[in-house]
């Protein structure tokens, strides 16, 4: 089986397993945890597409998440719009913010882009508190209607969005587009000298990243039935970045596993009380120290290599002969 076919087969098996878990255990609590994991997976994958491929780390990804969530909140509570309208609207607004903040900041070198995006998220969080008459201040916007009334139905919807988005971005990452983004990460000056419109590709990747993050923010708002300024907080972006690093940066599929692992880890540590955060932090430090390439993606690469290196049964002599074949030479007896 070819590697890319094996990748898609493994992805289908993974998402199939995720779909079966609520049916096997039948726990509403587990469904809630898995739903949050899927939404965090959307945020992590959207971050990885831009920052993981281009190398421009975005410390203000929470800006697009919060903008998407507040767009859904305003439309649903103030205008009475259906949640199904708020999802595309959230994507459009997030894209507009990406264009406004991305056009001037993506030209910045080094850590300045990360700091500029971080500043944008902090400013938006502050604005939500200043204009409390319209935003609800610290309490945010409450009373949103559920997108799907069934908790299990909402989980399957979030899982389907995550699967479709991951598939789309993996295809893009493995296309000519992804090759250019990785080339920009390697040597931006050389890409410019080769005639590549570097600015266009960076802005386009940021726009795609923001659109999916905004959709995830709207989904989160309709799941929690409220929106809070904390969505803009720095800790939101840091949590997402950590999930990407644990899963495997620049792989697209790795952050899905990273998001699920870290959300489940936090829930498993809930009974540890005050020790919960310290155990969680120490675990992350150990993973990032001993596995700098992440946990999920390297494990899958090793497993895939083991599966693809196996010789077909009953063809040992033929396989050995073919392996010895070199251009212009006969195989050794």
Image (spheres, grey):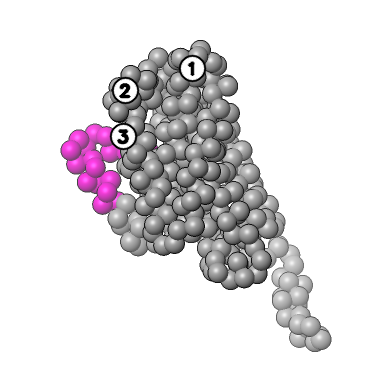
The residue at which mark 3 appears reads as: 126
Q: Residue at x 31, y 34 (%)?
A: 126
What is the number of the mark on residue 64? Answer: none
Specify the quadrant of the image occupied by residue 224: top left
In this rendering, is residue 178 above or below 42? Answer: below
Task: Say which quadrant the C terminus sits in.
Answer: bottom right
Q: Secondary structure at mark 3?
A: helix
Q: Main secondary structure of the magenta part?
A: helix
The residue at which mark 1 appears reads as: 76
Relative horizontal placement of residue 57, taking residue 91 as reference (left or right)? left
Specify the quadrant of the image occupied by residue 33: top left
Q: Residues within 10 Å of mark 1 (few under 14, many from 20)?
A: many
In this rendering, is residue 279 above or below 75? Answer: below
Picture coordinates of residue 254 (x, y %)? Answer: 50, 50
Q: Residue at x 56, y 33 (%)?
A: 92
Q: Residue at x 45, y 15 (%)?
A: 77
Magenta-tinted stretch: 261-283
Closer to the camera in the image, 128 or 29:
128
């Amino acid at each position: 089986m070819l590697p890319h076919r094996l990748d898609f087969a493994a992805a289908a098996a993974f998402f199939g397993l995720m779909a079966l878990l609520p049916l096997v255990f039948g726990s509403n609590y587990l469904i809630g945890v898995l739903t949050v994991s899927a939404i965090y997976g959307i945020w992590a994958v959207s971050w990885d597409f831009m920052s993981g491929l281009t190398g421009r780390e975005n410390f203000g990804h929470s800006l697009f998440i919060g903008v998407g969530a507040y767009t859904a909140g305003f439309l649903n509570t103030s205008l009475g719009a259906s949640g199904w309208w708020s999802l595309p609207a959230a994507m459009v607004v997030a894209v507009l913010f990406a264009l406004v903040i991305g056009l001037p900041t993506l030209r910045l070198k080094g850590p300045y882009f990360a700091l500029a995006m971080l500043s944008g998220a902090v400013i938006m969080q502050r604005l939500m508190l200043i204009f409390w008459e319209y935003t609800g201040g610290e309490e945010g916007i409450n009373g949103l209607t559920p997108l799907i009334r069934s908790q299990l139905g909402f989980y399957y919807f979030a899982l389907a969005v995550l699967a479709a988005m991951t598939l789309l971005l993996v295809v893009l990452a493995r296309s000519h587009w992804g090759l250019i983004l990785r080339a920009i990460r390697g040597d931006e000056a050389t890409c410019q000298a080769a005639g590549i419109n570097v600015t266009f590709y960076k802005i386009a990747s940021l726009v795609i990243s923001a659109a999916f993050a905004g959709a995830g923010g709207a989904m989160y708002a309709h799941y929690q039935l409220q929106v809070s300024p904390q969505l803009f907080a720095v800790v939101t972006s840091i949590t997402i970045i950590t999930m990407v690093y644990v899963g495997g940066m620049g792989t697209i599929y790795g952050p899905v596993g990273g998001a699920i692992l870290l959300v489940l880890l936090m829930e498993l540590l809930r009974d540890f009380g005050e020790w919960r955060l310290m155990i969680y932090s120490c675990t992350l430090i150990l993973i990032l120290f001993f596995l700098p390439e992440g946990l999920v993606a390297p494990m899958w690469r090793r497993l895939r290599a083991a599966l693809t290196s196996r010789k077909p049964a009953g063809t040992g002599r033929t396989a050995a002969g073919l392996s010895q074949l070199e251009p212009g030479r006969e195989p050794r007896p």
